[in-house]
Amino acid sequence: MTPLVIAHRGASWDEPENTLPAFRKAIELGADYVEFDVHATRDGRLVVVHDRPRPSRAYPTLEEVLELTAGRIGVMVELKHPYRYRRYDVVGRTLELVDDDAVILSFEPGALRTVRRLRPGLRTIQHVGFGVSIRSAAGAWAVGFANGAATPHAVARARSAGFATTVYTVNEPARMLELAALGVTGIFTDRPDLARRTLAPR
């Protein structure tokens, strides 16, 4: 099966990452999903940005992104440091906003356990590496590998354990084809147009 094309922070090769133009471009280019990062600001707003929000910058809110994508493209929502501002309940409030087709991902196993407790029907992706093992992914739909860690052995081990497999962030056609041959479920890429062309059935 052809891997899902997941636009990493939107079509971030063409537009600034984690912005509404990047998400519009990903829709235009035919990606299956957009992936984006959710943080809480110091005043409690849920915003879409990769690193910790700075007061001087403007960011799209989670509500704005979900309104743009609704019915047009799938969403994969990464919970970035969800416990940094515990009083703002980033996990719970995110789950109140996303629909049943959303996929939630994180490096934090505890956050994904909370997701599965509160919304057991949602699919989750446990990113592994950086001290997080495949064993930590118990209960998740998929595991997420960094590109360099997605060896044939690692992918086969995850698949044999019953997990779907995703790989981030891949922008080279030859590597996309290698991963497709390994049977990965989805590929995160900054270049969804290139991925679509590369992975199109021959």
Image (cartoon, helix red, strand yellow):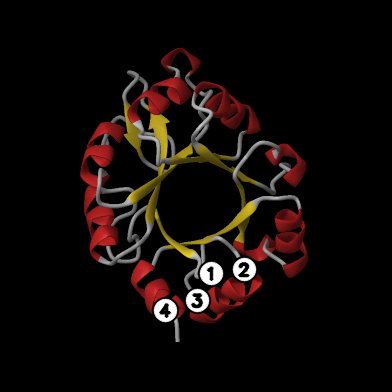
Element type at marker 2? loop
Query: Residue 92, which numbered label?
Result: none
Residue identified by numbered label 4:
200
The reply, left or right, for residue 135 in relation to residue 144 is right
**Dot 1 or dot 4, earlier in sequence:** 1
Q: Are marks 1 and 3 in contact (CB under 8 Å)?
A: no
Question: Extreme bottom residue here?
Answer: 202
Q: CA distance from mark 4 to mark 3?
A: 15 Å
Q: CA distance from mark 3 to mark 2?
A: 17 Å
Vertical side of 159 occupied by 67: above or below:
above
Q: Nearer the viewer, mark 1 or mark 3?
A: 1
Q: How many marks?
A: 4
Q: Are marks 1 and 2 in contact (CB under 8 Å)?
A: yes
Vertical side of 192 occupied by 6: above or below:
above
> Which of the 4 image quarters holds residue 191?
bottom left
Disc 3 crowd, CA 10 A, few/some/many (<14, 14-19, 20+): few
Residue identified by numbered label 3:
172
Q: CA distance from mark 1 to mark 2?
A: 7 Å
Residue 132 visible, this angle:
yes
> Residue 197: where, in percent of width, then height?
38, 79
Disc 1 crowd, CA 10 A, few/some/many (<14, 14-19, 20+): few
Residue identified by numbered label 2:
183
Q: Amino acid at mark 2?
A: Gly
Q: Amino acid at mark 3?
A: Glu
Residue identified by numbered label 1:
1
**Dot 4 or dot 2, earlier in sequence:** 2
